[in-house]
Image (cartoon, helix red, strand yellow):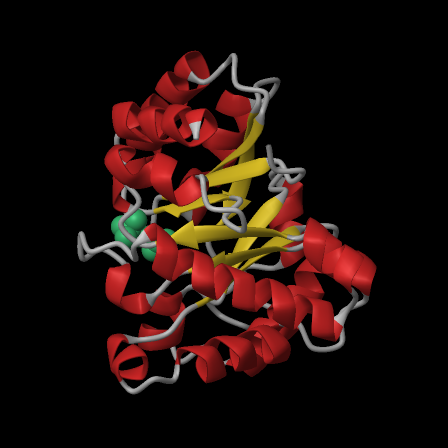
Amino acid sequence: MKSRKLVIAGNWKMYKTVGEAVALSRLLKRDLAEVKAADLIVCPTFTALKTVSDEIANSNLRLGAQNMHWEKEGAFTGEISAAMLRDVFCQFVIIGHSERRQFFGETDDSVNRKTKAALAAQLKPIVCVGETLAQRDGGQVEAVVTAQVKNGLAGLTAEQALDSILAYEPVWAIGTGRNATPEQAQEVHSLIRCTLAEMFDAATAAKVRIQYGGSVKPANAASLMAQPDIDGALVGGASLDAKSFVEIVQNGLGA
Ligand code: PGA
């Protein structure tokens, strides 16, 4: 038994209208109502946040957003602040997803600013890190992931680190159907925990939850979450369907 509580999140990305998001939330609420041993988070698009928030109020599902801006407010067309997310009862926010890094120019520096701004607003950041295939093939996994963790969490206190969740998402495994093997993932999760111990202290590192993400499916959920340093999953594609997300949670808990 791990001392850390599993945390399983569905990242719905740019999918689902408000009506579709509510329909999915309703099924998850019904089918996951008994789950107490894991924290369950859904991350709809911005437009669906408020309605999904109302739908899952008083349930065991928690609300997360997929991105935010680091400034409190201002002339930043198209952006959303931490306070706006709090206003619709978001408790979590994904920061620095590889799609944000790849397609929208996010860097470790923006990840760090956003992480700090989220924490300052009492939002728990889910900070994403992970190497590309070229970096893995080039033997750079350790250097890349360590730098992302150190730079992304730079300047945080140990207490703030405890309020954060990390997600290891190898870019080559996202949406490709090719997941990291449990052993490959465990190796990097353990590396991340060592990095946290270096940055903060061993006790803090032992408590921070680290999710795995990248083609998590019902069939691989158990073996991934059975690994000693894997504390849950950040699920993309398979979270868009109630049945497969429910099975991922059940199989993860059975691990
Ligand atoms: P995937 O996405 O499960 O579709 O691979 C994971 C993610 O991007 O968080």
Q: Quadrant of residue 110?
A: bottom right
Above or below 139: residue 124: above
| Nearest the eye: 241 or 203 | 203
Which residue appears at 27% of the width and 29% of the height? 244
| Nearest the eye: 205 or 115 | 205
Above or below 112: residue 92: above
Q: Quadrant of residue 220?
A: top left
In the image: residue 88, left or right of residue 235: right
Which residue appears at 57% of the width and 19% of the height? 59
Which residue appears at 67% of the width and 50% of the height? 123
**x, y percentage for residue 199?**
73, 74
**x, y percentage for residue 116?**
70, 67
User: How many numbered circles are shown?
Assistant: 0
Which residue appears at 71% of the width and 67% of the height? 197
In the image: residue 144, left or right of residue 134: right
**x, y percentage for residue 38?**
55, 30
In the image: residue 2, left or right of residue 95: right
